[in-house]
Amino acid sequence: MGLDLFHDKVSHQSDGSTSFYEAEYFTNSPEFLRNNKDLLHTLTHSCDFFDIKIFPDDESVAKYRGIYPNDKTIKLVGELSTLEKKFREIETYYNLDPSDKFIMSGQFGYPMTAFMSYLQVSYAVGFRTFKGLYFTNEGLMEKCMISEFRENFRDDILYTKKEDVIRAAGYLDLDYKYADEVLKEFQTTFIDNFEEGKSIFHTSW
């Protein structure tokens, strides 16, 4: 079963935390939010981006357009290091901030066995302000639950009670040779280290 389990703890930003939860995520745990109101921050983060894709050759661009005809992003051919002048022109024309961008690699392909690569440069152009809590990750486990876990836990809820973590232990997949290690890791990382009022248990699938 493909899912991840997380144990996080709210923290001060001064602790080096960069990850955060938005306050609205705690609608099922209003008491948790009230008890940590001193850790609430007003955060401003990007919510919209201006994207530029870089392809190795014209053939790749043509194939990409054939698969994604409605993609209106700017498409360039070459290497990032040789396109500096073009990027400066685009940044000036669209009033983009070169200090507020990030670069990621992407793949596309059809059929799926014939992937082709590109680079995407994204500039933040839209921002929103909200209340949030910074956190540090205290534990992570992967693919260790039986299928019934999904029927009794939701991936859109943050669980803040230790009783829910103990309940989750009842769905650990212990039917294989590493069962003892899984049980010990969950007990140590998720149950024993769970600090009610500060800890958050959640899952993603």
Image (tube, helix red, strand yellow):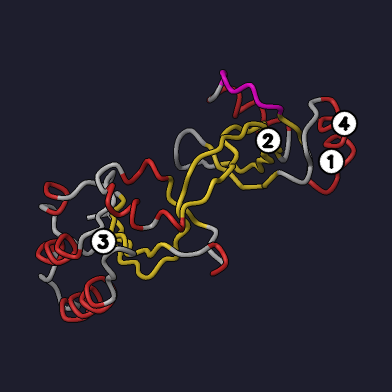
Q: Amino acid at mark 2?
A: Lys
Residue that badge 2 annotates: 53
Q: Secondary structure under badge 2?
A: strand
Q: Amino acid at mark 3?
A: Lys
The label nearer to you, 1 versus 4, is 4
Q: Earlier in the sequence, mark 3 or mark 4?
A: 4
Where in the figure is residue 129, as x and y percent of width and height? 55, 38
Residue that badge 4 annotates: 89
Q: Secondary structure under badge 1?
A: loop
Residue that badge 1 annotates: 83
Q: Disc 1, disc 3: CB below 8 Å?
A: no
Left-right relation of 71 to 189: right
Q: Earlier in the sequence, mark 2 or mark 3?
A: 2
Q: Amino acid at mark 1?
A: Leu
Where in the figure is residue 176, as x and y percent of width and height? 14, 73
Residue that badge 3 annotates: 143
Q: Amino acid at mark 4?
A: Glu
Q: Disc 1, disc 4: CB below 8 Å?
A: no
Instruction: Determine if the magenta segment contains residue 83.
Output: no
Q: Earlier in the sequence, mark 2 or mark 4?
A: 2
| 84 to 194, vertically: above or below | above
Check disc 3: other Cα within 10 Å, few if <14, some if 14-19, many if 20+: few
Q: Quadrant of residue 93?
A: top right
Q: CA distance from mark 2 to mark 3?
A: 34 Å
Q: Quadrant of the N terminus?
A: bottom left
Region rendered in magenta: 69-74
